[in-house]
Amino acid sequence: MTVYSEAPPPELSDWLLRENSHQRFLPSHIKCPKGMLFPVLLGLALGLVGAFPSPQDDAAPGKNWVVIVAGSNGWYNYRHQADACHAYQIVHKNGIPDEQIVMMMYDDLANNENNPTPGILITGPDVTPQNFLAVLKGDSSKVKGGSGKLSAIDLQDTIKYMHENKKYKKSSYACYYDEKRDTYLGDWYSVNWMEDSDVEDLNKETLAKQFKIVKSHTNTSHVKQFGNKTLAHMKVIAFQGNSKSGVRPAPPMTLQPIADRDLTSSPDVPLAILRRKMMKSNDIQEVRGLLMEINSHLKVKEMMAETMRQVVEKVTGNQLKAEEVLNSRSDLTQSRCYMNALTHYKRNCFNWHKTEFEYALRHLYALVNLCERRYRADSILLAMDSVCHFNKQRGF
């Protein structure tokens, strides 16, 4: 992750992420501010995009500051950093100067061995929860290296009006598969709000209208409103641009319709990519290697499902109750219990930041269900230790 708080970064090369109908507009220069204002969140999918709205009263001058975060890494997650670059282009072309845009991204794609068009990206250590919260608070002294995951509890302490986010049911779908790069180039929800911003007149479109459009297009996940809903009447330009900057906003674009969006559930992305690569290959040795990867991936997937089932059975002590836990979905209210279980499961069972274990995310709902049924967190953690230790001894 890089947060440029004093001097601007070196010049960045133009980075082509899409070809033909999948082409995206990406930055050639990015500069970041010395400080920032408290943001209103506009999107949560690839990572996060935040902006503080322009003052509506001329007597109260101010600036827009934008924070764009791509919190994932790896070639399989290429789409998230691509979406972050698209978000940069939207706010940049609509009048937000580079020195008021903060970009937080991993540096693992430009020179990746899978990249057929090597380029230059922002360099530095990982995007971390601590760094993200420090940036939101404008505290450059706490921006450090490291790794981790942003918890709902930490985020609630920083952004008060997101307290209801713990109930937010969200799934993510990849889209726009690129045959040359063997990866997906966008996240469906992110693409929908950004492409809407590309084609609409943001001086006229309200947040309410954009929400309605994006919700209707994003039929694969649950698009929700939260926070201060009285902002819905405000124009999108107040959040994604600056109508008072003196820079004429970019005219709406015309995007060619794309018939095949290649929608794929996020945890299924690694397996889907392996299958696509196998189908297009004419090299028998390569096909055999990919088949071995696919079989290994499926075995790990089955093992993760079995592990969670064993954990739930140990906690409930009853196979029937375990089935009830595994076959239901509860809203999250017991955040502390869930975060303890979540952290322990990631550390001691499956680290879903590793590509081979990403599907473990599909089973976390069971931990929510256990906590909501008031099973003690320490009993859940003990069950994990017993089951996951046994599986590790078996070589998993």
Image (cartoon, helix red, strand yellow):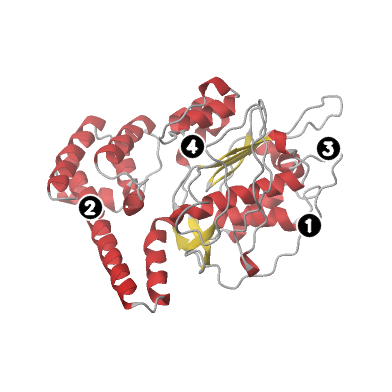
Distance from disc 3 to disc 4, alpha carbons, whole Å, reads 30 Å
Element carrying mark 1: loop
- Look at discs 3 and 4 and give the one toward the viewer: 4
Q: Which residue is mark 1?
A: 252
- On residue 379, the disc is none
**Furthest-top residue in view?**
141
Distance from disc 2 to disc 4, alpha carbons, whole Å, reads 38 Å
Distance from disc 1 to disc 2, alpha carbons, whole Å, reads 52 Å
Residue beneath the point at 78% across and 31% down: 55
Q: Tell me if residue 235 can be seen.
A: no
Discs 4, 1 touching: Cβ within 8 Å: no
Q: Which residue is mark 3?
A: 245
- On residue 323, the disc is 2
Residue beneath the point at 21% across and 45% down: 312
* Coordinates of residue 53 in the picture (x, y in percent): 72, 35
Residue beneath the point at 16% across and 43% down: 387
Q: Which residue is mark 4?
A: 127
Question: Which of the two discs, 3 and 4, labels the residue nearer the N terminus?
Answer: 4
Discs 2, 4 touching: Cβ within 8 Å: no
- Look at discs 3 and 1 and give the one toward the viewer: 3
Structural crowding at the residue carrying mark 4, measured as other residues with C-alpha within 10 Å and reported as few (<14), some (14–19) or many (≥20): many
Disc 1 residue type (three-letter)? Pro
Q: Quadrant of residue 33?
A: top right
Question: Which of the two discs, 2 and 3, labels the residue nearer the N terminus?
Answer: 3
* Coordinates of residue 217 in the picture (x, y in percent): 60, 60
Disc 2 residue type (three-letter)? Glu
Distance from disc 4 to disc 1, alpha carbons, whole Å, reads 33 Å
